[in-house]
Amino acid sequence: MTNTSLQYDQVIEQCRDMFEHKMKDYGPNWRILRPETLTDQILIKAKRIRTLEINGVSKVGEGIWPEFIGIINYGIIALIQLEMGYCDDVDISQEKALELYDQHISNTKALMIAKNTDYGEAWRLMRVHSYTDMILSKLQRIKVIENNGGKTLVSEGIASNIQDMINYAVFALIRHNQGEV
């Protein structure tokens, strides 16, 4: 588990660095996005990954790995938006956005550690394209929940599904960084 925790942190360091650089370019303009829009943005990234996995060719020159980073960062943004709600104008500083990023990734990592203990690191036995399929499945679940006004009867809510998607994307990047894919 210690190795997984360290590998997780290394991936998140890369993702957070990208998040911070994008905020220097654009600011936290994502505060205006509604949660459903973020679901759709993550869906676009996951569909692109799947298309690239199937076709093996990128017409725009970017591979799947930056898309997994995008899923992680948009997932964190979605968790922030679920917590704070969206707004019509940017209402937080870049520093506050980074503080919220760190808080939500810490909670998401804690969930991974708990599940990883229960499942015995089964994710290491999965194929990377299965992570993509699981992310797409979670997105379909989220869309149904959103269409039901955010309510579930017995299932996990939106935030839990987002955290699972983030963790699957982290797993893919860990495997990539290890040279396994």
Image (cartoon, rainbow, N blue to C red):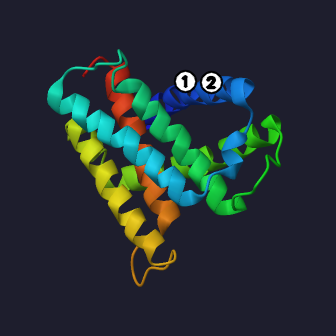
The answer to which image quadrant residue 26 occupies is top right
Report the side of 67 relative to 47 (left or right): right
Residue at figure coordinates x 51%, y 77% from the top left: 149
Q: Residues within 10 Å of mark 1 (few under 14, many from 20)?
A: few
Is the N terminus in the top left, top right, bottom left or bottom right quadrant?
top left
The residue drawn where x is 33% and y is 61% is: 140
Calculate the distance from the C-alpha at mark 2 to the C-alpha at mark 1: 5 Å
* Residue 17: image tag: 2
Are the residues flagged by discs 2 and 1 in contact, CB closer than 8 Å?
A: yes
Please state which amino acid type lies under the numbered disc 1: Gln
Q: Amino acid at mark 2?
A: Asp
Q: Position of residue 132 (x, y in %)?
A: 28, 42
In percent of width and height, residue 155 lies at 39, 75
Is residue 138 something that shows in the picture?
yes
Instruction: Report helix, strand or loop for mark 1.
Output: helix
Where residue 153 appears, x then y in whole percent?
41, 84
Mark 1 lies on residue: 14
Q: Is residue 128 visible?
A: no
The quadrant of the picture occupied by the C terminus is: top left
Q: Nearer the viewer, residue 20 or 4?
A: 20
| Left or right position of 126 against 35 | left
Q: Quadrant of residue 129 in the image?
A: top left
